Image (cartoon, rainbow, N blue to C red):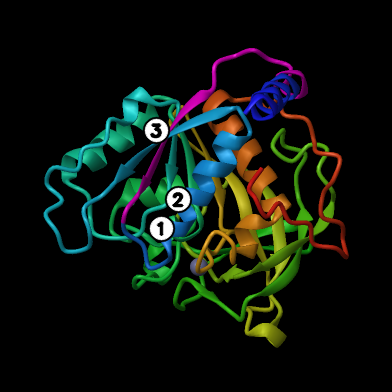
Amino acid sequence: MKRFLLGSFFLLLSSFFLNGCAEKPVKVLLVTGQNNHHWEVSHLAIKQILENSGLFTVDLAVSPAKGEDMSGFHPDFSAYPLIVLDYNGDSWPEETNRRFETYVKNGGGVVVYHAADNAFPNWKAYNEICALGGWEGRNEKDGPYVYWKDGKIVRDSSAGSGGSHGQQHEYILHKRSDHPIVKGLPEQWLHAKDELYDRMRGPGVLDSLLYTAYSDPATGGSGREEPLVFTVRYGKGRIFHTMLGHAGSSLEENPAMQCLGFQVLLLRGAEWAAMGEVKQKVPAVFPTGTHVSLRDNYR
Ligand SMILES: [Zn+2]
């Protein structure tokens, strides 16, 4: 027990010095409860990643199950500087939608995680907040395809469905910005086995494109350099959108979220969305161009 306490003390102390601040942790509301993914795994992984950093504390807003009465689902977004979206399911009540829009417009921070960008195809503001989404009947009516070609972002209005991915595999991420979230991170690094979202569509107004990856037709991909991690602005709000992190079957079998690169991006993106700056130091260890690096225990 004594050893445990001493260990905890040093952990706290080191996180204090590493992050150079004695500021109170940022309060996060993680919205989950329905998804076509293992949200029971993903929301715990996200909570652990955020809280183990010492920078955040996470409350949960768990929705009613699919098909159940949603009329009482009114999370108090305004009490939090950061909302993390791990939700893809039934519509929220109109009032909840309006409150969320107002929250973001007035300067709230948002993290859009993986399949959260599949949700709510008919909610205009939500799709502007995500910038890009997929599936659920999305096509050219929802906005252009957006991808990276010849050193710049292309907006392609050709017809076709929005949202797809090939087989899961390890792939290289390519840095496209010097935004504070990615400042000091490698130009390219190998992400652990994950889905690679492709052919996403939407209003497509990105603030800063952070990382792309090549979606190889050999693994069932689009043949395009796809935008997977980026920021969006909506009113005064800051949004960090990561398409990475398809949840595995358990916290132990969850490589896409155990990837150190995924976790570091989530933490830095969350800090930027909440605070407008990134004080975290770049970790000494990071995936390289040829080697995946995991933090199996989410810390
Ligand atoms: Zn997925």
Residue type, numbered disc 1: Glu
Label 1 – label 2 distance at C-alpha: 6 Å
Label 2 – label 3 distance at C-alpha: 21 Å
Residue type, numbered disc 2: His
Q: Residue furthest front?
A: 1
Q: Which mark is residue 40?
A: 1
Q: Residue furthest top?
A: 22
The picture places residue 75, in percent across and down from the top left corner, at 26, 36
Tell me what residue is drawn at x 33 percent, y 31 percent.
77
Q: Earlier in the sequence, mark 1 or mark 3?
A: 1
The picture places residue 165, in percent across and down from the top left corner, at 56, 76
The image quarter containing residue 58 is top left
Residue type, numbered disc 3: Val
Q: From where the camera sits, is residue 51 visible?
A: yes
Mark toward the viewer: 1 or 3: 1
Q: Nearer the viewer, residue 188 or 287?
A: 287
Q: Which mark is residue 251?
A: none
Q: Earlier in the sequence, mark 2 or mark 3?
A: 2
Q: SS for tag 1?
A: helix
Q: Which mark is residue 104?
A: 3
Q: From where the camera sits, is residue 205 visible?
A: no
Question: Looking at the rendering, in which quadrant would you find the C terminus?
Answer: top right
Q: Are marks 1 and 2 in contact (CB under 8 Å)?
A: yes
Few, some or many residues within 10 Å of mark 1 (<14, 14–19, 20+) = some
Residue at the disc numbered 2: 43
Question: Looking at the rendering, in which quadrant would you find the N terminus?
Answer: top right
Q: Which residues are magenta?
A: 16-33
Few, some or many residues within 10 Å of mark 3 (<14, 14–19, 20+) = many
Tell me what residue is drawn at x 46 percent, y 71 percent.
162
The picture places residue 245, in percent across and down from the top left corner, at 58, 59
Q: SS for tag 3?
A: helix
